Image (cartoon, rainbow, N blue to C red):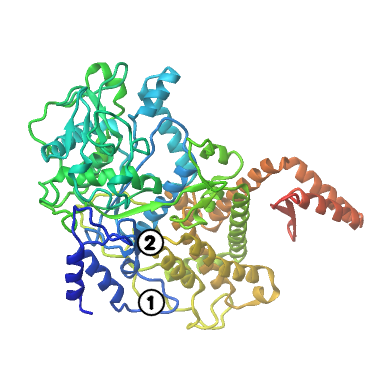
């Protein structure tokens, strides 16, 4: 079937801004449909065996599940070489963050890492703070503090939680209170285009009935929007589905001046205005939890379409006022304390220049790809504060280390439901410990080889470095995590010449496939397929078995290519763990460890292992001294040849979740599961 025929068929079925929606899926505009078919049918050159795909080749493989399309689509950013624009809805800062928040930001942090370090895209990642809201005002009044003091406290606590979970800082973190003028300007545009109305008291409501096609993202029909079901009840509204754009001032609440009287913005207008002001009229990725599809993201979509005039071309961006003739929107002195800190000047200058007179994507949408993660469930119910079945990140980190929680979150696909349980977290802790211990064993073996081991690692890094994608233009400004593959100049596409066959410590045959490259190929392919992190974690099993053979068996230790294999797996595993956010705590620490060589990496791995052991002792109700004393008594029994007593101590510890490991260097222990489990 020709693409032209497909194009005509889609043109007949797709009617933007109407309530006509296919029952099985929402059809995308013709340009995107043609693009999807072309990407799916084009012939790509396969990657050579044992060769890490270039960043340019990897970009061609990336597909993401688009909530609007109800399926996977090839990822083609607005600017082919970036920067990719990504906006993820942030937290409302009035309390500690819970596991649902952790899942959102770990998922999109992993996407951020993959797009930057894996694909080589520069990414402008924006994650906002809602720092003015009904819940914030109510909690501040209960606590007897100004709203600004409450929000400052929980912004700081949120940052602590994200740092613990190895979530990288975004490029920009705007606060709603720093963008009130942009929100007022957007509301004025919506009013001017006939999609909103002002009521008594100074409130402004969006007129859902005026914008045909409302519900395209969520699939909800107008009749589904009944008052009281995620839709606020207010007799002043024309329809139950209408939602607040501006809320008139109430006594004792923060307020800003506006053409409709003093007040504050509604929740949904915040993100629409900040996306428009910071990233421009069209963005590549808009993300959040599945609970935001309706009403928040549905309303964002409606607001943005209504503000732009439903398909007309956008005026030039870049600091120009969105609506001319509005009064000065600075806060009154009486409420300055509630405003929150404005966006730092340095961050404001990080905005990439928006294209001049850019049309909406396909003439309709301001978001190219809508991404949403699944719920976290407890006892088959969605975790939420309203149900009282939620756990804060702090609650969990009292018993489990941060990286174990991150592993647990990545073990399920980001779109699938995640069932929270202690058993799942125990399994995640155990699996993470096994991976880290295997990496530590590899480093120990390489260190034992001295200079030859260090040399093998350097050769492995050169072999596994993928060619970089084209560099962005100098005018592009963004913040992104760095890696050896994305920050260094593009090396030659030819792999380094294999060492001499048969020489001790080197690969036996130059044509042998590289296990490190094979692992990276499998991992990058899985991440390119809609961020399939469960497949990434499963891909570690084979390399871990190889490491066990090379470090514990006589045949493995005698292999002439042992050091080469160990070095390649060491480098490849390091890159995989960095892509997943399971590596060193930050770029500076990672660079320091690399500068110190294998000794620095050994120390970093030992710190992580010690953190896992200490956390396990807390859960098991034991102390390090008690375990050390039991190991000492067992050793004394063995020296006295009282093997029955020694075995009894080992069995007792195993029953309590402490597994002993006898090594040439002495007896060590690792966490296990108590016998009662």
Q: Is residue 440 above or below residue 281?
A: below
Q: Is residue 74 above or below residue 288?
A: below
Q: Which structural element holds mark 2?
A: helix
Q: How many marks?
A: 2
Q: Is residue 276 visible?
A: no
Q: Residue at x 27, y 19 (%)?
A: 335
- Asked whether, in this view, residue 315 is left or right of residue 362, the answer is left
The numbered mark at residue 47 is 1
Determine which quarter of the picture holds residue 139.
top left
Tell me the residue at 47%/34% (across/down): 96
The residue carrying mark 2 is: 118
Dots 1 and 2: beta carbons under 8 Å? no
Cα separation between marks 1 and 2: 16 Å
Dot 1 falls on a residue whose secondary structure is loop
Residue 168 as seen in the image, left or right of residue 366: right
Looking at marks 1 and 2 on the same chain, the residue that comes earlier in the sequence is marked by 1
Mark 2 Cα within 10 Å, few/some/many (few <14, many 20+)? Answer: many
């Amino acid at each position: 079937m020709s693409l032209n025929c497909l194009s005509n068929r889609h043109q007949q079925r797709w009617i933007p801004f109407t309530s006509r929606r296919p029952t099985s899926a929402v059809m995308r505009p013709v340009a995107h449909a043609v693009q999807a078919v072309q990407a799916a049918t084009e012939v790509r050159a396969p990657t050579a065996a044992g060769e890490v795909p270039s960043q340019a080749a990897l970009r061609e493989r990336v597909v993401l599940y688009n909530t609007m399309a109800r399926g996977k689509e090839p990822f083609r950013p607005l600017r082919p070489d970036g920067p990719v624009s990504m906006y993820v809805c942030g937290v409302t800062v009035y309390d500690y963050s819970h596991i649902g928040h952790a899942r959102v930001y770990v998922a999109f942090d992993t996407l951020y890492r993959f797009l930057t370090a894996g694909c080589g895209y520069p990414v402008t990642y924006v994650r906002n703070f809602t720092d003015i809201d009904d819940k914030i005002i109510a909690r501040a009044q209960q606590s007897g503090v100004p709203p600004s003091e409450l929000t400052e406290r929980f912004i700081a606590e949120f940052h602590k939680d994200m740092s613990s979970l190895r979530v990288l800082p975004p490029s920009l973190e705007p606060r709603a209170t720093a963008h009130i003028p942009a929100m007022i300007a957007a509301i004025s545009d919506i009013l001017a285009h006939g999609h909103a109305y002002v009521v008594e008291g100074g409130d402004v409501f969006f007129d859902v009935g005026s914008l045909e096609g409302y519900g395209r993202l969520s699939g909800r029909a107008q009749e589904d929007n009944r008052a009281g079901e995620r839709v606020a009840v207010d007799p002043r509204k024309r329809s139950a589905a209408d939602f607040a754009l501006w809320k008139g001032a109430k006594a004792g609440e923060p307020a800003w001046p506006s053409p409709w009287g003093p007040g504050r913005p509604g929740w949904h207008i915040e993100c629409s205005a900040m996306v428009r002001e910071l990233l421009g009229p069209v963005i590549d990725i808009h993300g959040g939890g599945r609970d935001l599809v309706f009403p928040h993201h549905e309303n964002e979509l409606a607001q943005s379409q209504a503000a732009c005039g439903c398909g007309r071309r956008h005026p030039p961006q870049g600091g120009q006022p969105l609506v001319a003739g509005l009064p000065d929107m600075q806060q009154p002195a009486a409420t300055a304390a509630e405003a929150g800190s404005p966006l730092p000047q340095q961050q404001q200058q990080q905005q990439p220049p928006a294209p001049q007179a850019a049309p909406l994507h396909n003439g309709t949408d301001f978001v190219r790809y809508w991404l949403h993660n699944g719920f976290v469930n407890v006892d088959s119910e969605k975790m939420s504060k309203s149900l009282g079945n939620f756990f804060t990140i702090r609650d969990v980190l009292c018993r489990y280390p941060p990286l174990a929680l991150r592993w647990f979150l990545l073990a399920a696909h980001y779109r699938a439901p995640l069932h929270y349980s202690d058993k799942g977290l125990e399994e995640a802790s155990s699996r993470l410990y096994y991976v880290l211990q295997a990496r530590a064993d590899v480093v120990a073996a390489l260190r034992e080889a001295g200079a030859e081991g260090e040399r093998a690692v350097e050769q492995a890094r050169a072999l596994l470095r993928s060619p970089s994608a084209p560099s962005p233009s100098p005018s592009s400004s963004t913040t992104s995590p760095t890696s050896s593959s994305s920050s260094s100049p593009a090396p030659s596409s030819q792999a380094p010449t294999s060492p001499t066959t048969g020489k001790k410590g080197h690969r036996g045959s130059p044509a042998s496939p590289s296990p490190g490259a094979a692992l990276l190929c499998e991992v990058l392919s899985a991440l390119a397929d809609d961020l399939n992190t469960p497949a990434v974690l499963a891909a570690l099993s084979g390399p871990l078995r190889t490491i066990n053979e090379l470090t514990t068996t006589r045949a493995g230790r005698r292999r002439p290519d042992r050091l080469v294999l160990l070095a390649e797996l060491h480098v490849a595993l390091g890159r995989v763990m960095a892509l997943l956010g399971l590596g060193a705590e930050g770029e500076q620490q990672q660079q320091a460890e690399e500068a110190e060589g294998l000794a620095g990496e050994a120390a970093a791995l030992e710190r992580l292992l010690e953190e896992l052991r200490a956390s396990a002792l807390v859960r098991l109700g034991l102390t390090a001294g008690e375990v050390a004393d039991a190991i000492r008594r067992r050793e004394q029994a063995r020296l006295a040849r009282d093997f029955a007593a020694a075995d009894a101590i080992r069995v007792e510890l195993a029953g309590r979740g402490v597994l002993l490991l006898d090594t040439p260097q002495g007896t060590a222990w690792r966490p296990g599961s108590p016998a009662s489990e």
